Image (cartoon, rainbow, N blue to C red):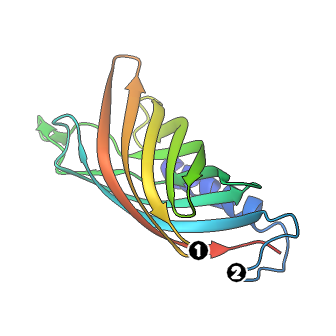
Amino acid sequence: MIRNSIKMLAVAAIVTFSMNNNNVKAQESNPDGTRTRLGIGLGLGVPTKDNADFVIAPDLRLQHDLVGRTSLTLTTGYYGFLGKPEVAGEKIGSDLIPLKAGAKFFFGNTFYVQPEVGVAFSVKSDHGTPFVWAPNIGYANQKWDVGLRYEGFEYDGGSNGMVALRAAYSFNLSK
């Protein structure tokens, strides 16, 4: 019940923040050249430790383009660790709900680097809230965004991570 509440709260916060007006028009930007977009993505990855076989990571990313070749981002989603090992018949480890802030720095019109930092909320109550850091590289145009990232999860008692490929489609939310 708590995990569903956290998911709904994260999605509601992003939608509320991004839909600050009723005039959503495609492919237009504000007079100052800025634009706000919502990306819906799917990441597929492999963990860096043996706590799972595979990670599936759907996400929502709010991106606000600043003047120049820099954008600010806010990302949330769900990281499902598939094929988790079992101890005494119970799966160990926990899926995560990340909340990250970052910036995209474009080189040319389409290639970028994107550092992100934040936290991830474990869907199990006793698995902690790791600090998350994620360097990304990628290609993005007006609609599509494809990137490769390493994502590190720093817990009090250790660390974990994943390498993932993300593909996303974005919608323009600007006036």
Horizontal and vertical percent position of residue 40:
51, 68
Horizontal and vertical percent position of residue 91:
20, 42
Characterize the local packing of mark 1: few (<14), some (14-19) or many (20 or more) Cα atoms within 10 angstroms: few
Q: At x 38% / y 47%, what residue is drawn?
A: 149
Q: At x 30% / y 42%, what residue is drawn?
A: 162
For label 1, the residue is 142
Could you tell me which secondary element the residue under label 2 belongs to? loop
Q: Nearer the viewer, residue 36 or 88?
A: 36
Query: Quadrant location of residue 20?
Result: bottom right
Instruction: Judge from the rendering whether residue 121 lies leftward or rightward of residue 157; answer left or right.
Output: right
For label 2, the residue is 27
- Residue 93 visible? The answer is yes
Q: Residue furthest right?
A: 31
Instruction: Judge from the rendering whether residue 136 lies leftward or rightward of residue 164; answer left or right.
Output: right
Q: Are marks 1 and 2 in contact (CB under 8 Å)?
A: yes
Horizontal and vertical percent position of residue 90:
18, 40
Horizontal and vertical percent position of residue 153:
39, 32
The kind of residue on which mark 2 rests is: Gln
Q: At x 52% / y 46%, what residue is drawn?
A: 114
